[in-house]
Image (cartoon, helix red, strand yellow):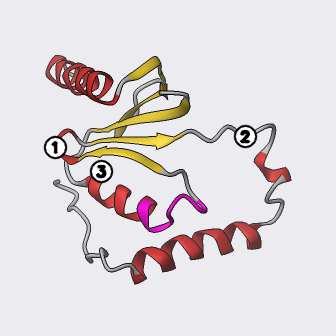
Amino acid sequence: MSKETAVNMDTRAAWCIENWGLTSLEWLSGGFTSYVAFCMYGAIPSVLKLSIYTGMTECEARVLQSTAGSICPAVLEIDLDRSALLLERIDSVGDLSLVYPDVDRETEIWVQIFQSWVSSSSFRPGFPTLED
């Protein structure tokens, strides 16, 4: 990560911590598209996600909001200017393959996600370009 990116992430994270009242941040290793921390939002176990790419947060938030927390984590806070999402944290106990042991069931879940996203009124076709 470049020094400029690190400063930007620190500034964005500080804003989220202060304005959303986040505590107990535990940063996970940085990824190629975002930086993620487990945290507490009041008494709610949460995940703070800071995207590296502008525009990806809006797309991800629309998909997650269209599921209304039914089959994906609920969106607790969004700040598009800072490309920041605060999501409910779902902790699994053990191997998820025990919950969804076959590919057919997993595929049904993904189909529900994509159908609700495409049929939502907020769906706008198109994704950021590779350059974006």
22 or 100, which lies in front?
22
Q: Is residue 117 magenta?
A: no
Image spot of residue 22 (x, y percent): 40, 24
Local packing at callout 2 (Cα closer than 10 Å; few below 14, some 14-19, many 20+) is few
Q: Earlier in the sequence, mark 1 or mark 2?
A: 1
Provide the residue span drawn in magenta: 65-71
**Element carrying mark 1:** helix
Magenta residues, dominant SS class: loop
Q: Quadrant of residue 6?
A: top left
**Residue at the image point whose x is 72% and y is 40% from the top:** 92
Local packing at callout 3 (Cα closer than 10 Å; few below 14, some 14-19, many 20+) is many
Asked if residue 74 shows in the view, the reply is: yes
Q: Which mark is residue 57?
A: 3
Image spot of residue 99 (x, y percent): 81, 55
Image spot of residue 87 (x, y percent): 46, 43
Side of 31 where 128 appears, left or right = left
Side of 17 where 5 appears, left or right = left
The residue type indicated by label 1 comes to Asp
Q: Which mark is residue 81?
A: 1
Q: Earlier in the sequence, mark 3 or mark 1?
A: 3
**Element carrying mark 3:** helix
Q: In whole angstroms, how far apart are the C-alphas of marks 1 and 2?
A: 31 Å
In the rendered view, tell whether residue 24 sits above or below residue 78.
above
- Pick out the residue farthest to the front: 42
Q: Quadrant of residue 11?
A: top left
Q: Which mark is residue 1?
A: none
In the rendered view, tell whether residue 33 sits above or below residue 122.
above
The residue wearing badge 2 is: 92
Q: Quadrant of residue 102?
A: bottom right
**Element carrying mark 2:** loop
